[in-house]
Amino acid sequence: MRIISCCIALMLLLTGPASAQWTVEYQREKLDTYYGIAFPSASVGYIVGGGGIILKTTDGGSTWVDQTLPVPDSFFDVFFLDENTGWAVGDNGAIVYTINGGTNWIEHSQSKVLTTADLNTVYFVDDYGWTGGDSEDIFRTTDGGTTWYLVEALGSNSEVEGISFVDTLVGYAAVDGDGIIYSTDGGLNWTAASVNLGPYPYTRFDIEEIFTVDDTLAVATGWGSLVGPQPTIIVVSTDAGQTWNCPDTTYSWNSYTYGHGINMFDDGEVVIVGGGSGFAAPNIHSSIDLSTWSRVQEFYGDDLRDCAVIPGTNTIMAVGGNGTIGTSTDKGQTWSFNFDPDFGFAGIKGMMNVGTTTFAVGTNGLFMKKEAADDWEVSLAAPLGFAPILHDVWYLDGVICVSGQYDYLIKSADMGATWTQLYHSASLSDAMYKMHWFDALNGLLVGEYAGDDAIYTTDDGGATRTLIWHNVKSYQFNSVHFAPGQGKFGVIGGDDIGLYYTIDGGLTWNAGVHDVATATNDIEEVFMVNSKEVWAVGDNGTIVKSTDGGANWFQQPSWTTTIELMDLDFNPLNGHGWISGNDQTARHSKDGGATWIDLSPTLGAVGDDIDCVYLQNETHKLYIGTDHCMIQYWDSSPTGDMPKSLPFVLNQNYPNPFNPSTTISFTLDRDGFVSLNVYDVAGRVVATILNKTMTAGSYDVGFNAKSLSSGVYFYKLKTADQEMTRKMILLR
């Protein structure tokens, strides 16, 4: 059972920008990326990152403590010679060091003087040290870091990303624009190495990190550019850095992610971590002999920038985007990640409510729950440590169902305390973006399969599913919505003005006809006000409307031709509607969509995207959810017009005749105790569907008559002072 909350909203009308009272109900801190990690001993380790972060652990990574720093600049690399002596480099040529294990950090006298460009890497062998970065130069010290000087000017577009030395003479550098260079005289002179990428025809490549294994053996990682994907690159040198080759030509590198960090266990096994931009999943590769490689399945939403083996153990820790810290105790085969309600960047993608409880889902496996006047509870909906972008959430007879990226479908029977994973794929081209549940067992899910649009049905609560639609058109379905209280009329929206409608409860779908000239615009959200009136929004300010259930669509006036419109909600009782989108877009219509008024929300980040707009009927709040994990609401104006009253209605079941399942829709005009019983022709109760207290609203409930024989039956909806009865026919 699902409350059709958007169509039963008992809220006062919003009266326009002049009376707008936006209130921030939740805002999650956006932490900077962690870029570097080092463990000089089994117990002591350091993490550096954006915003001038240096963290220290003294218990092997279980807890981390902020260090006091003399500068606020971001740090991109950290290196420790021992537990006491360490260096960190970063923004604007910042250089800091410690000689007492991080108790005090000192800004070097040449910090931001040696160069004002970012420094990306630092490495030491005894008193010899090297650093480099966006200045396209390499700097060296021979007196333990007391004095630094320029040794190599590499030229334009030659940013130094990583440096590693075998000893005080032989070393390597990863350089954007020049690939890999090597030195045999302590870094005074550098020579371009030969890099052979094997069978992979990259149009360009960048090496991000380099690691010394022994006197002659080294490994480097980065990414290559093809048309579209940016696959991981791993190359190995066996001659002290002069030539580098792709070690395993049979290995599938095409993973859309970069290689960023490298480290090695005591037995010689090497692990590489990486990730892509935005929310591309991390990539983790490992090899025992550097000639053959294996890859751990992508499983988390933020990229990884560096890793460090805890000496003398099989434990490796990795750090990355938005405060991510990962730990593996089995050499990188399985991982657990920190999750703190106050860390990370996570956008709100979907919301719904039942009674006074509201749910929200979003990126990085975000699951949020708010009961009545309580604060939002934040957790990770990830039963196996996998945390993709979550797009939709439903509540069905005590069970929460969540779907999203990577073909993700999970359920919880205890309000989100624990989760059961029903489906999951590592493929970026599989997803279940949106759902519609007719009852607790029967549902419809839309998204993409193998990169193409897909529709699934299920009749067992998602335990198994059937693919009923798969067009090879290289686009996806982004939204599905059914007419409130009428389970047979529905619409789907997708890429390239993909608009489809059904009149038989989703068994068959037909393409809608539209007048949108730019057919490459994607439809992001659809909404059925009733069985005839349907709205859809999408790319480049696209707003379209249908008055015949989705068969024909016509463009509507829009205030923009550039902004991507992401979500919409309507109150069918009074014709009011709301649209959200990129660049702080939140608009309100009081005239059935003829005109849209800017609601002007004030967001934490200028230009932030509003991916979700949702009308909460019980609290009379209009919610918006942003890309920076902010939830705001606009309470109803007390001077607004009241919407029309809800009717007491019992609709005809659908399908009818049926065998053996059907859906019964009804609307309650007030809160109270409700019963819904099924009777045979003799007037005997043969089934009780509902017998409980319920709130005002519209409902769809399922009835399975598998224990009954063919014949005529009656179902009665009864409250304290009202009742209504309809006939249905079971045909076997």
Image (cartoon, rainbow, N blue to C red):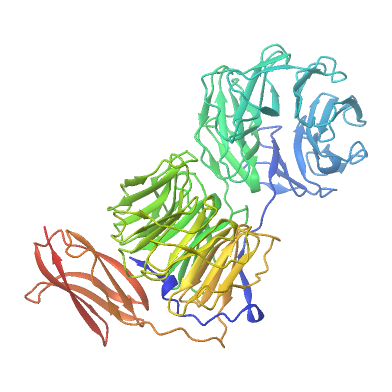
User: 387 or 53, which is in the foreground?
Assistant: 387
Relative to 512, residue 20 above or below = below
Residue 410 x, y percent position in the rendering: 41, 51
In the rendered image, the residue lying farthest to the left is: 682
The image quadrant of residue 117 is top right
Residue 206 visible in the shown view: yes
Q: What residue sits 55% from the left and 27% below the top? A: 253
Left or right placement of residue 481 versus residue 428 in this view: left
Q: What residue sits 77% from the left and 42% below the top? A: 75
In the rendered image, the residue lying farthest to the top is: 239
Left or right placement of residue 579 versus residue 60 in this view: left
Residue 199 x, y percent position in the rendering: 58, 19
The image quadrant of residue 697 is bottom left
Residue 63 visible in the shown view: no
Residue 383 x, y percent position in the rendering: 44, 47
Image quarter hosting the N terminus? bottom left
User: 620 or 533, which is in the foreground?
Assistant: 533
How many marks do you count on the picture? 0
Relative to 89, residue 356 above or below = below
The image quadrant of residue 120 is top right
Residue 352 x, y percent position in the rendering: 46, 65
User: 608 or 580, which is in the foreground?
Assistant: 580
Q: What residue sits 44% from the left and 71% below the top? A: 6
Image quarter hosting the C terminus? bottom left
